[in-house]
Image: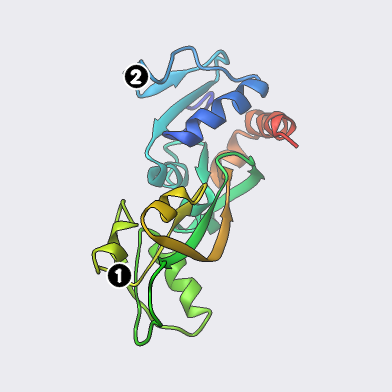
């Protein structure tokens, strides 16, 4: 949108927690995202619209100019080339932890460990910093099944309450990163649309709960 700004937001929990924050910054959707079939959602601000997309796609849209700004989890940003994005705000919503976990009854683990995760880059960097080589098995969901069924020795996954780990006989070993949602901005858009983007960032910053 040449004369306005487009904000890409992750589906699910991030969207649910972003909408009240955006409303406090003066941006409200005109349609209910749970019922509308629209892919581009207008707001009460004539120059602002939202697109609601998969979490992993948010940085891609912002990096390539499909959106001017985005709201995405730090876990997703750690997996992409976020050096080419501005990340001006920690929105302090959709908080959780990226954890390393193993079966509760696991015996001493030796040799080259197998780690199931969808966070391949982050997991590889985590073990590389320890000087430890591991075999990474990329999965897209139900990570807790992997060690239960013998596919992996460990998992790296997001943990909120820890109940899912416990119910599947797993125990957290280490907190790799504290995760929350961040505002990201396309660098070209920041220069070309700064008259709209900078005031929006300021309003959003003031809306973040302290």
- Front one among 25 and 185: 25
Residue 38 shows which numbered tag? 2
Examine the rendering and report whether any part of residue 124 can be seen.
yes
x, y percentage for residue 103? 38, 67
Name which residue lies at 64% across and 28% down.
196
For residue 160, above or below residue 153: above
For residue 174, above or below residue 84: below
For residue 187, above or below residue 17: below
x, y percentage for residue 24? 67, 22
- Tag 1 secondary structure: loop
Q: Where, quadrant-wise, is the C terminus in this rendering?
A: top right
For residue 6, above or below residue 44: below
Measure the alpha-carbon separation of dots 2 and 1: 40 Å
Name which residue lies at 36% across and 55% down.
168
- Front one among 60 and 209: 209
Q: Is residue 24 left or right of residue 46?
A: right
Q: Is residue 52 left or right of residue 99?
A: left
- Check whether the beta carbons of the residues at disc 2 and disc 1 lie within 8 A of each other: no
Examine the rendering and report whether any part of residue 184 can be seen.
no
Residue 183 shows which numbered tag? none
- Earlier along the polypeptide chain: callout 2 or callout 1? 2
- Front one among 44 and 155: 155
Name which residue lies at 35% across and 79% down.
113
x, y percentage for residue 28? 56, 17
Name which residue lies at 55% across and 25% down.
19
Residue 112: quadrant of the picture: bottom left
- Front one among 29 and 127: 127
Q: Is residue 54 left or right of residue 176?
A: left
- Tag 2 secondary structure: loop
Residue 152 shows which numbered tag? 1
């Amino acid at each position: 949108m040449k004369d306005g700004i487009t904000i890409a937001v992750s589906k699910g929990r991030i969207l649910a927690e972003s909408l009240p924050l955006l409303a406090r910054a003066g941006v409200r959707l005109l349609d209910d995202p749970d019922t509308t079939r629209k892919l581009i959602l207008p707001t009460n601000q004539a120059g602002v619209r939202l697109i609601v997309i998969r979490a992993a796609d948010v940085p891609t849209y912002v990096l390539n100019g499909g959106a001017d700004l985005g709201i995405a989890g730090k876990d997703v940003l750690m997996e992409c080339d976020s050096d080419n994005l501005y990340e001006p705000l920690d929105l302090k919503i959709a908080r959780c932890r990226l954890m390393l976990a193993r079966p509760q009854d696991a015996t001493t683990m030796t040799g080259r460990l197998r780690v199931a995760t969808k966070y391949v880059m982050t997991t590889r960097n985590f073990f590389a910093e320890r000087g430890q080589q591991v075999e990474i098995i990329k999965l897209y969901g139900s990570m807790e099944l992997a060690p239960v069924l013998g596919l992996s020795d460990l998992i790296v996954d997001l943990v909120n309450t820890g109940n899912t780990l416990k119910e599947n006989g797993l125990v957290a070993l280490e907190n790799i990163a504290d995760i929350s949602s961040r505002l990201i901005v396309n660098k070209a858009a920041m220069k070309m649309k700064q008259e709209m983007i900078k005031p929006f960032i300021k309003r959003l910053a003031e809306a973040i709960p302290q």
